Amino acid sequence: MNRKGFLGIFCMLLLMGCENPRLHLLNVFKSIEVEVSRNSVAFPLLNDICERYGPRMAGTESAAKAEELAAILFRSYGYEDVFFQPFTYNLWQRGTAVLRIDTAGSFVEFPSLALAYTPSGNVSSVIVDAGNGLIEDFDGIDVSGKIVLIHLGLLPGTPETVKNTHRAQKLALAVAQGAAGCIAVSSTPGDLPTTGTVTLDGGMIKIPAVSISLERGMQLRKCIAQRKCYARIQTENTSKPATTRNVVARMEGYELPEETIVIGAHLDSWDISPGALDNASGAVSVLDIARTFRALDLKTRRTIDFVLFMAEEEGHYGSELYVREARHRNRLQGIRYMFNQDMTINTYGFNLMGRYESEDFFRETGELIQLTDSSFSNTIANFTHLGSDHAPFIFEGISTFTPLCRYQDFHSYHTTADTPDLITPLMLEKNVKISAMILYALANAQELPVTLFTGEQTRQYLIDNDLQESLVVSGDWIWD
Ligand SMILES: [Zn+2]
């Protein structure tokens, strides 16, 4: 073949690459694979954030430093449109919590942690076992003026039809039943008590509530079945208004700038650990995905907002603020997807949160991802919940999804054990690669399969996905 002929075929192949969207996608996916494998900063960044700043409770000094670092990093990757979204909320401050239990004639101290938004208090009473702490568990028992024992998960033997509710709703129920105090049993093994918010309105709840480990809880449950057991709960906690900031880096689309794909993760953690998995893993993923886009000079038809939310743990305040701001600036209607990154390692598929119209798009894109990563199983799930920063977007009718992640060991969730030694570079890189690929595919697709739900469609979606009842209990059901 002469030089001219060779050049002709070369140009034809090049044009085919440009014209065939799937071939183009595959080429971009391969370049993402190589870039992340060679240059990912996710793991060193996770260690740095956890070691340098430690726990990052929204509104504290260490959280403010982490916000600052995130903005500096976005700019260093080449983003020019980087901004903060400050807001004030009620920060709960942990003091002391002492739980003493009398199971055999004398009071013995049990390792415990106050649940967030527990007030200061001092109660002493008999313990009443209220099983899973759901409405039906209070039938035939009187917890009035007593200390109630509840399970934060679902006890073994609970019928499969029973749906668990958020710990805050369980606490609201215990308060409504007249309990004077609450001992909440962790649902994860590992002999550690867990923390987490129990407020529904951002204020202190009415009774002291502490958590104990799953193992201690099971032991206590057996004692209660045999004899009367007593507990004393003493807590000292405060709260105060505090200011914190979301960090946003915006990459404007070259063709449809008014359409936006939001990828977000909460940067804040609880106060008892550096929150390596929950959620430094998601935060560094968003940062490293943003870095990868600039490193490869990827341009997209739609706008991408890379967001680090604050105060997710206390009640999704940062993501609520982002949604409010978007509405205020007439940008809300243009948000096509919210891709939430919360505890993101070992990604093997996507949870589409019950938005079935996206399944074909994700499955077909996932087949291309599999060509660059054969261990990616391209699993599509539809497990809908409201437990993270995607919730405020769902309420606006926006389609949300998350990575499906495999956890070898989940005992660290909301405990003192959520430290970086549980995470490896490969676990993070897997998520960064796959998330960057699907993000690029969405931001650059000719057409997207989703539309914004109307209020009526959102109402039906929440009902169909069994979310109505919990929203009614928390006072957040606004669709009737
Ligand atoms: Zn989280």
Image (spheres, rainbow, N blue to C red):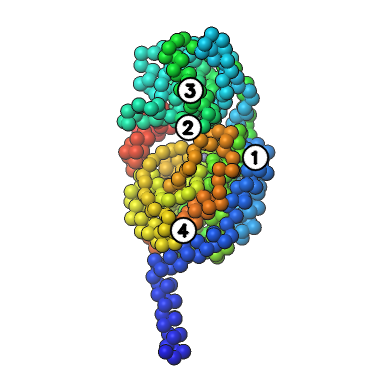
Q: Can residue 171 be seen?
A: no
Splitting the image into 4 quarters, where does residue 468 fall?
top left
What numbered label is drawn on residue 188? 2
- Give the number of the mark in front: 3 or 1: 3
Q: Which of marks 3 and 2 is nearer the N terminus?
A: 2
Label 3, residues with CA under 10 Å away: few <14, some 14-19, many ≥20:
many
The residue drawn where x is 48% and y is 14% is: 127
In the displayed structure image, the side of residue 138 where residue 344 appears, left or right = right
User: From the image, which quarter does the N terminus lie in?
Assistant: bottom left
Q: Earlier in the sequence, mark 3 or mark 1?
A: 1
Q: Mark 3 points at which residue?
A: 217
Q: Earlier in the sequence, mark 1 or mark 2?
A: 1
Q: How far apart are marks 4 and 1 (CA)?
A: 31 Å
Q: How far apart are marks 3 and 1 (CA)?
A: 29 Å
- Give the number of the mark in front: 1 or 2: 2
Q: Name the residue under label 1.
A: 54
Query: What is the secondary structure assignment of the residue under circle 3?
Result: helix
Rendered location of residue 347, percent (x, y): 46, 50
Rendered location of residue 201, percent (x, y): 51, 29
Q: What residue type is labelled 1?
A: Gly
Query: What is the secondary structure assignment of the residue under circle 4?
Result: helix
